[in-house]
Image (cartoon, rainbow, N blue to C red):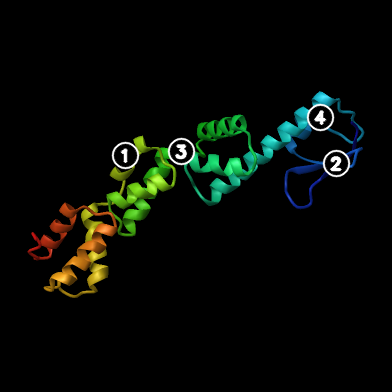
Amino acid sequence: MRIQSLTPSQRVAGRWLAGLEDGTILRVGENEVVSFSLYAGKELDEGTLEGLKAAAHASRLKEKALNLLAVKPMSRKALEGKLAQWEASPEETEALCSRLEELGYLDDARYGAMVARHYSRKGYGPAKIREELYRRGVPRELWDDAVAEMEDTDQALDAFLDKKLKGSPLPDDPRERKRLTDACARRGFSWQDISQAMARRGGGWED
């Protein structure tokens, strides 16, 4: 198979368009141009052509993964799901994710800590943060370390109560108390944390 033309892409920097004699357009990166010594007029045997296609596909997967991680950090499991949507093979997925981990672009421990800090600043407690870690694909063995990175639970709960009460004192009505404690529980705080927070405000909430 002969390469009829080889021109740089006008849309994507670093990408080249290799026009083959059968009318196929191969999108290749600069690495493939160099490593396969591509030029217009070059003859590609079947094995070289298949190798070029595989290398170009792997490069596109890596490019898309890096672009995604630059915009939206995620866990390895979440990225594996994206790669599957992009029709990456299990072997390509394993190789790419492992390489991105080696380069530091993919780090479940760091990502889990980031998730914990983010949600604790928004007033969520440990239980809710664990739910988020699960939903985002952070391995369970990293949850405790991630939760340890969250901001102080007392501060997070006090900030949430401040927002709910809007400067008002603690309610005396048992129904209002229940609504308040239920709201705290839905945010992922334990009853022990909630009762201690109420006690700090002078409320007798043992019931």
Q: Nearer the viewer, residue 157 or 24?
A: 24
Question: Which residue position holds label 1?
Answer: 145
Residue 107, numbered circle: 3
Quarter location, residue 59: top right
Q: Secondary structure at mark 2?
A: loop
Q: Are marks 3 and 1 in contact (CB under 8 Å)?
A: no
Residue type at tag 2: Thr
Q: Secondary structure at mark 4?
A: helix
Q: Cα distance, mark 3 to mark 1?
A: 13 Å
Residue 45 vs 172, above or below: the answer is above
Q: Cα distance, mark 3 to mark 4?
A: 35 Å
Q: Which of the marked residues, 4 or 2, is nearer the chain's N terminus? A: 2
Give the side of residue 132 with respect to residue 25, left or right. left
Instruction: Give the label, 1 or 2, closer to the camera.
Output: 2
Q: Which of the marked residues, 3 or 2, is nearer the chain's N terminus? A: 2
Residue type at tag 3: Asp
- For disc 3, the neighbor class at 10 Å (few under 14, some 14 to 19, many from 20) is some
Question: Which residue position holds label 2?
Answer: 24
